[in-house]
Image (spheres, rainbow, N blue to C red):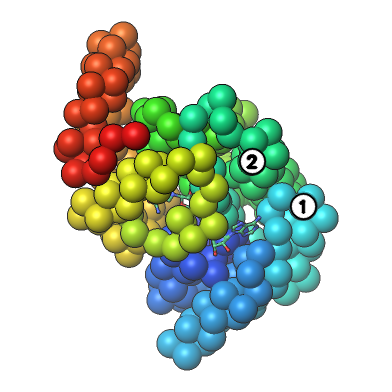
């Protein structure tokens, strides 16, 4: 992290879960954190946790789906600290279900937050980074964007979009000393399902079973991300199952989806997860 002596980080959705863990980890390393969230109470809680631990933080309200809010975030970083070094586009929500049943309104809701929100973050901070002569963009995608599990269409689509955007930027910004890291975790327990939209209770059972089986916490994911920023890695596949699925799909794409379809249609996925099939 020596390339960033001014130590200024902006983390969207840092009022909870992974965003909060990252905020606390950066603060512990002496970074100033611009905490922001659509839920201002949660953002202020994170700010307080950082200040109580002796760190430096400022919190503002920001709905990443609104361009004016994200533009204001970049302006705040500029006014408070004369710029930023790292932006983490972390805020995200869940919408899942059977594609033919998902209301179009839910597709638009998740695309606006999970994909357009990340586009807003990149568009607002790239000019600051270019002016400063460098920076780092961290986009929180998901292993869902690689594996595309059934009944998770909207979530998969937005995360695949974030992966593609990050790969595009990696090459596009190569001359500008701006690093790009895209993070693809599998499940870890947070408050993510609190606002989740789904078409059938089966998806809720699936998600809860995945969370229950997860051996990893937001703290582990956060530490892994910081290591990957340090090493300027493009891909961060935080857990072993994410790395296995990524390699399997890349090497044998047809077999991967044939197998997934077979396991899903026969109800084996539910059996492994220990839940009732629809
Ligand atoms: N938890 C997992 O298993 C998991 C796995 C892979 C990827 N992710 C991704 O990690 C990121 C963080 O999620 P989390 O698991 O910590 O969930 P979380 O719900 O605990 O935290 C998400 C935060 O984003 C905020 N948020 C929601 N909509 C917003 C908006 N429009 N503008 C600004 N903030 C908004 C929420 O208020 C919340 O504080 C998300 O992008 C999620 O998709 C999570």
Q: Is residue 199 left or right of residue 184?
A: right
Residue plotted at (54% across, 69% down): 15
Could you give the CA–CA distance between mark 1 and mark 2, rounded to whole angstroms? 17 Å
Residue 190: give x, y in percent of width and height. Answer: 40, 61
Residue plotted at (62% across, 78% down): 41
Q: Is residue 194 visible?
A: yes
**In this figure, which residue is indicated by the disc labeled 1?**
66
Crowding around mark 2 (Cα neighbors within 10 Å: few <14, some 14 to 19, many 20+) is some
Residue plotted at (53% across, 85% down): 48
Name above or below for residue 275 compared with residue 77.
above
**In this figure, which residue is indicated by the disc labeled 2?**
106
Q: Earlier in the sequence, mark 1 or mark 2?
A: 1
State which quarter of the image contains the N terminus: bottom left
Identify which residue, 178 or 65, lies in the foreground.
65
Secondary structure at badge 1 equals: loop
Identify which residue, 85 or 183, lies in the foreground.
183
The nearer-to-camera label among 1 and 2 is: 2
Q: Is residue 174 visible?
A: no
Secondary structure at badge 2 equals: helix
Q: How many marks?
A: 2
Residue 80: give x, y in percent of width and height. Answer: 72, 74
Residue 57: give x, y in percent of width and height. Answer: 58, 78
Q: Is residue 152 left or right of residue 242?
A: right
Residue plotted at (33% across, 52% down): 208
Identify which residue, 7 or 93, lies in the foreground.
93
Asked whether mark 1 lies closer than 8 Å to ligand 1, one says: yes
């Amino acid at each position: 992290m020596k390339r960033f002596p001014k130590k200024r980080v902006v983390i969207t959705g840092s009022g909870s879960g992974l965003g909060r863990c990252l905020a606390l980890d950066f603060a512990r390393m002496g970074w100033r954190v611009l905490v922001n969230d659509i839920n201002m109470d949660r953002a202020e809680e994170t700010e307080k946790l950082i200040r109580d631990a002796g760190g430096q933080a400022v919190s503002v309200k920001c709905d990443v789906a609104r361009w004016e809010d994200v533009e204001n975030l970049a302006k705040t970083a500029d006014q408070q600290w004369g710029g930023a070094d790292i932006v983490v586009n972390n805020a995200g929500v869940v919408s899942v279900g059977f594609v033919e049943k998902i209301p179009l309104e839910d597709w638009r809701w998740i695309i606006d937050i999970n994909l357009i929100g990340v586009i807003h973050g990149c568009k607002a901070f790239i000019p600051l980074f270019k002016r400063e002569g460098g920076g780092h963009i961290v986009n929180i995608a998901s292993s869902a964007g690689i594996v595309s599990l059934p009944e998770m269409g909207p979530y998969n689509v937005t995360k695949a979009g974030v992966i593609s955007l990050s790969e595009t930027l990696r090459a596009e910004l190569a001359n500008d000393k701006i690093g790009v890291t895209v993070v693809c975790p599998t499940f870890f327990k947070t408050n993510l399902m609190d606002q989740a939209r789904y078409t059938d209770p089966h998806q809720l059972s699936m998600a809860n079973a995945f969370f229950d089986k997860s051996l990893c916490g937001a703290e582990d994911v956060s530490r892994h991300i910081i290591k990957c920023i340090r090493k300027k890695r493009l891909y961060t596949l935080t857990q072993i199952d994410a790395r296995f699925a990524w390699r399997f799909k890349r090497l044998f794409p047809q077999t991967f989806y044939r197998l997934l379809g077979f396991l899903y249609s026969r109800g084996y996925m539910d059996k492994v997860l220990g839940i009732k099939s629809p």
